[in-house]
Amino acid sequence: MVADVVVRRVDALPEPGTLALVEDLKLVPGGCACNVAAVLGKLGADVHIAGLVGDDAIGESIVAQVERYGVDVGFVKRSKEVPTSAVIVVIPSHGRQSFLYKVGGTEVFDASMVPTDSFGSFGFVHIGGAMKLNSLDLADVMRAAQAAGCATSLDTDWDPTGRWMSILEPVLHHLDYLITNDQEGSALTGESVPDAIGRKLIAMGPKTVIVKLGADGSLLVTPDRVQHFAPNKVDVVDTTCAGDSFIAGLLYGLSSGRTVERSMRMGNACGALCVTQISHFGIDSAESVEALARV
């Protein structure tokens, strides 16, 4: 759970001692798990989030905002020792955004804060931003989820420590769905082509591998097939949260009994709607996602 301060448009920093105007500046809930939960809440899913925030104003703000989306925040912990993880997202007029990140609760979150005793009441257990959860034993959590009869999914995120596969390898055999993107997948496998990334990862143990390809859509990889899903064409305002919104659409589809193919299209549609506004504000309901996905 991360506090995102999104600033748009910033093409250059003002000279020291001067001021520049920006088009948008918002404090919004961020972090991979937080974004996925918020979008799932908007889609109407029964979703709970576990995480750690600081006992501070920005932590209270993002928890309150996520709760307004219909997410149960009863498993969220507060800490007086560490601050809420936070990032400044700087969006230029053209090109990709930049990030200034302050570590906090995300990096301290550990297995004692995971509600494994409640897993039996859930259909899915998803770990978002796995590479930044430095204190969490990923395999232990997913092993507990499998024992409770849950489907398991994990999104990698970028690893700022460079450990990559040493973090991921122990959990791979406990995953129904491993989700990564082309850049993260390349760092994990040494491969540069999405098909090759997916095939190398699927050989390591997960039942299904999904590679997010941004403006090029997404790739589904199983032991017996590789299938590309074309993107939905929209006008892009901000790509922040697009990958997390894709995951929310995918999980919503799977958890509501749709086929993996229809769920992939829902993921693409969710990602497309996300980029039409800042953060995930472009997503408002399952009906709008289904209409764009034509499922």
Image: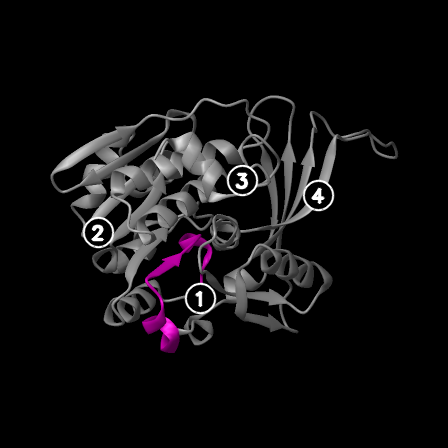
Front label number (1 vs 4): 4
Of the numbered discs 2 and 1, the one sitting upstream in the chain is 1
Query: Which residue corresponds to the image point at 60% horizontal and 65% vertical from the top-left?
Result: 53
Q: Which mark is residue 135?
A: 1
The kind of residue on which mark 4 rests is Lys
* Magenta span contains residue 134: yes
Front label number (2 vs 3): 3
Q: How many marks?
A: 4
Front label number (2 vs 1): 2
The magenta region covers 116-135
Q: Are marks 2 and 1 in contact (CB under 8 Å)?
A: no
**Measured along the vertical axis of the image, is residue 183 above or below residue 58?**
above
**In the picture, residue 140 is in which quadrant?**
bottom left
Q: Are marks 2 and 4 in contact (CB under 8 Å)?
A: no
* Magenta span contains residue 161: no
Query: Which residue corresponds to the image point at 49% horizontal and 54% vertical from the top-left?
Result: 37
The kind of residue on which mark 2 rests is Pro
- Report the Cα–Cα distance between label 2 and label 1: 22 Å
> Where does label 2 land, which residue?
206
> Where does label 3 land, which residue?
283
Image spot of residue 147 (x, y percent) = 24, 71
Image spot of residue 238 (x, y percent) = 58, 31
Closer to the camera in the image, 210 or 17: 210
Q: Could you tell me which secondary element the residue under label 2 belongs to? A: loop
Of the numbered discs 3 and 4, the one sitting upstream in the chain is 4
Q: Are marks 3 and 1 in contact (CB under 8 Å)?
A: no
The kind of residue on which mark 3 rests is Ile
The kind of residue on which mark 1 rests is Ser
Q: Which mark is residue 26?
A: 4
Front label number (3 vs 4): 3
- Report the Cα–Cα distance between label 1 and label 4: 29 Å
